Image: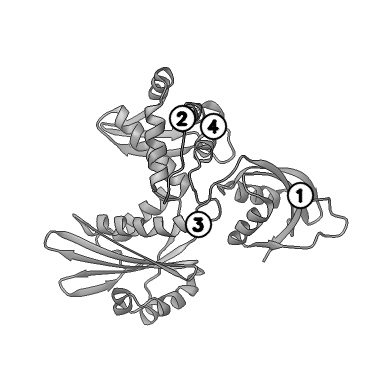
Amino acid sequence: MSLHPRTHSRLAMLLGLFLLVLAPAAAAAADGPVVVTVTAEDESAALEQGLEQALVRLAGLRSEPVLELVEALLDARDDAGWIAALERRQQVEDESYRLEFDRFRLRSALRDAGVPSVLGERPGLLVWAVHERGGQRDLLGDAVDGPGILSALGDLAAARDMPLLFPLGDLQDRRAAQPSDIVGGVTEPLVEAARRYDADGVVLLHVRETTSGAEARAIAVHDGREYRSSASGENPGTAAHDAVARGLDQVAERLARVAAEPEWLRLGFAGVQGYGAFERLRAELTRLQAVEAARLDSLAGDSVVLQVRTGLEQDDLIDLLRGSGFARAEAPEDAAGADAWLDRR
């Protein structure tokens, strides 16, 4: 992925957007702070690790531009602001730190630095996983986790804010998902079997224990494309985590876009009945990286018009919202004016 040029003056401006650990206004923000917990030797290392984790979560992937931004923000830090940020950190226990980052400021930093991010709904991928040890292969699921493999992937999903789904591992799954297909990378029957879970794609994961630890190979399938990755580790959970993380980065890289300076659009949504439904819709929209804010313009009958602040052009935003189940619609009769109307498909 190519890097985006940045000048030193822009870095100084980014710092003002970036700093940092929870400010009072952040607690009142609709989408809340980004909270990370890290293990580090000291406060400085904790902030560096925490900043990287927070930016990776918001961007949806660990990429060169994200890491460049972390380094740039650390290099350009202001001593007074940095010290104030340190004072607001919370040490949970020895070498463990809980940090709360202002989500709005980090989003602004990513946008202003031209860092590609996953701006829309993040795909839910179903993980078909096989754990192999001593020649025995087990299909993992709710009934069988293996030695911490699914637990490690659950941590990864939370850290990336990328939903990973796990099969039940029941009789129906065992009939449809053969370990030999997962190990052999035969994707078609496993994609078909994943329809039961309404997944957007699948991850085929083969974790094999070795004399020195474990090896993991993953194939992520999304939108008709396959992405292959592998990793080794001291235990099956670590190897699985790293292999799937690299696959998710490949999926996210294709989905990532750079947002422009945000502007307001008036979007109408049909089939929204009542204020409670409006609040749920607004919360859904503001979870997207592409939407900085959404506020009520008008509410009548079963339709609502929102003022949406976004860094995408209207057509690009509507295209992105297809991933959340929306499609263009005709304006309802006697509805308020809007730049475009949408409805659930």
- Give the Cα separation between the discs numbered 2 and 3: 26 Å
Quarter of the image where one finds residue 8: top left
Q: Is residue 51 visible?
A: no
The numbered dot on residue 305 is 1
- Provide the residue designation for mark 3: 255
- Provide the residue designation for mark 2: 11
Mark 2 and mark 3 lie on one chain; the one further toward the N terminus is 2
Q: Residue at x 31, y 27 (%)?
A: 43
Q: Nearer the viewer, mark 1 or mark 2?
A: 2
Q: Nearer the viewer, mark 2 or mark 4?
A: 2
Tag 4's secondary structure? helix
Q: Residue at x 87, y 59 (%)?
A: 333
Outermost residue, top side: 80
Is disc 4 in contact with disc 3, using a CB cutoff of under 8 Å?
A: no
- Give the Cα separation between the discs numbered 1 and 3: 27 Å
Tag 1's secondary structure? strand
- Amino acid type shown at disc 1: Val
The numbered dot on residue 66 is none
- Provide the residue designation for mark 4: 26
